Image (cartoon, rainbow, N blue to C red):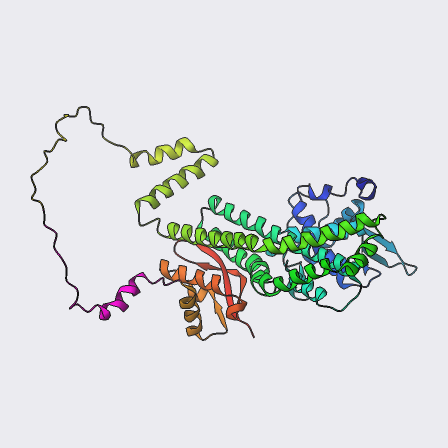
Amino acid sequence: MDLFKIIPENFFSILASKNKHIYLKAIMQAFKIYEEGSILGIDKKIVVEVLTDFCEQNQFDEAILENSSKEKANFLLRKLEECGWIDIDVTNDYEEILNFRDYAIQIIEALQNIIPSYDIMDNVFEIDGQRKIEFRGYIYTIYSLLNSNTLEYGLLMEQVYRNTKLFIRELRKLDARLKEYIKSIVETTEIKDLIETLINYKTELVDKSYQRLKTSDNVNKYRLFIINKLENMQDDEIIMDVIARDYMIKIKDYEQAYMKANRDINEIIDIFNELDDMILEIDAKNRTYINSTIGKIKFLLAEDNNIVGKLNAILKFIKTANADNKLDEALKIIKPLYTVNSIKTINEGSLYQPRGSYNHMQAQELFIDNLDFSSLEADFFKQYESPYKESEIIKKIDNLEQNVILGSELINYDSSDEEVLTALYMLIYANDENNLHVIPLDDLIEHKKFKMKNFKIERNG
C-alpha cells in the first residue's frame, strides 16, 4: 500500500514551517493529555485549556493573526486537524471530542524515541512520573521465556528472536548516540556547554541506558543459560519439528520453515557470543567521552594561566569575529600581540660555541642494604594517587552526610579548578550502584569563569 495514500500530503508541513518548534511542543503537550483521557477520546475544551497555558509561555517565531492565547490554542488545533494529525468529532450533545489519528500516534512515539534532550520538550515524555528509558529488561525477558515450561515452542522462539533483535537495536542506538556525544566535544568551546552536555549525557544516556546495560540487562548473568538452552532445543528433533510447523503459518513449505527455525536459533546464539565485543566497544566510547570532556574542561579552566590557553583564547576571538564578518577588525585588534622585530643580518659565526672539554665520570655503586624507605612509601605514593578515583569521590559524598547535594553547594563563584572538577566527578560517579542519582535543575550556578545549569545529587531511598 502507498504510504502517501495513508498519510496526508501536508502532514509534515507544520514541522517544516518557521513555527515548527511550537507545533512540535504543542503536539507533544496535546498527546500527553490525550493519553490521560478516555479510550474514546478527550474533550477538546480540555486540550484548548492546556494549549492556552502553553501559548502564554511560548512565543511564535512568525506572527499569526490570533491575538489571545486561547485564540492561538484553537489556531494550533485547526492546523493539526487540517494536516491530518487529529480528528475532532461532534457528539449528539454537541460536545467536541479530540482523537489522534492512528498513524500520527505511531509517528509521535517515534519522535519521542528520537529526541535526545527531554528538557527541551518540557518533560512531556514522562510516563507515570518517570522519563522513558531505552532498555527494558530484554535479556531478562529472553531468559524468562527460555526458562518457562511452555510447550508453545514456535511462539516462544518468535518472542526470543524479537527481544534479541530489539536488544541489539537499543545497543546500536546507544553506540550511535555515544559517537554523537564524542563528536560534540570538538565543536564545543565553552565550559558551560561542556558541563551541561555532560549532565545531559549522565542523566539521559548513562543512567537510563548504559547503567542498565551494566546492571539489570547485564548479559553475563544469563548468557550461558540462554546459549545452552538454545543449543539443547536445536538438538531436539521434536522441538525443532514443533517450531517448524508453527512457522508454517507464514512459510508454507516445511523444509524452508525448518531451515528458518535453525537459522533464527543460530543467529541468536551468534549474537550472544559476540555481545562482549559490542559492550567492550561501548565501554571504550563511554570512557573516551568522559575523559575527553573532563580533559577539555581542565584545559579551558586553565586557559588564563598558560600560553597555550592564551593562544586558544585569541583563536576563539578570531573565529567568533569571522563568523560575524568582522575578521579585518579583529586582526587589527590582535596585531600588536604578534608584532616581531625583523633581523636584517645575522653573523653565521655568532651562534657557534666550541665544545668544552670534560672528564669521564666513573660509575659509582649505591649500597641500599642499610637504607629503610618504609617511612617514605605512604608520602611517595600519595603524590601519584588520583584525587578523582571513584572510591575517593564517593567518600567525599558520604562525608557530606546529606540526602540532597546541590551543585551550587559544590561550585561557587570563587571555587578552584580542583573543586569544580571534584564536583563533576561527583556527578559522574553518582549512580544506582552507589545509591545515588542526578537530577538537572533550571537555576544557574555562577562561577568566575563560566555559568552553568544547577543540578542535585540525591540518595536513593
The residue at 9%/48% (across/down) is 361
Image quadrant where one finds the N terminus:
top right
Find residue 70 and report its horizontal and vertical position in percent. Answer: 73, 54
Q: Residue 239 lies in what quarter of the image?
A: bottom right
Q: Is residue 3 above or below residue 43?
A: above
Q: Is residue 384 magenta?
A: yes
Image quadrant where one finds the C terminus:
bottom right
Find residue 158 and report its horizontal and vertical position in percent. Answer: 76, 57
Majority SS type along the magenta span? loop
The residue at 67%/54% (across/down) is 268
Q: Is residue 379 magenta?
A: yes
- Residue 55 visible to an observer of this rendering: no
Image position of 54 (left or right of 86): left
Q: Is residue 157 above or below residue 349?
A: below
Image position of 268 (left or right of 309): right
Find residue 456 and report its horizontal and vertical position in percent. Answer: 51, 66
Q: As drawn, which residue projects farthest toward the right?
A: 92
Of residues 358 and 22, the one nearer the viewer is: 358
The residue range painted magenta reads 361-388
Find residue 75 and report its horizontal and vertical position in percent. Answer: 75, 49
Of residues 175 and 62, the one nearer the viewer is: 175
Of residues 434 and 92, the one nearer the viewer is: 434
The residue at 45%/64% (across/down) is 426
Q: Residue 117 lies in what quarter of the image?
A: bottom right
- Residue 441 visible to an observer of this rendering: yes
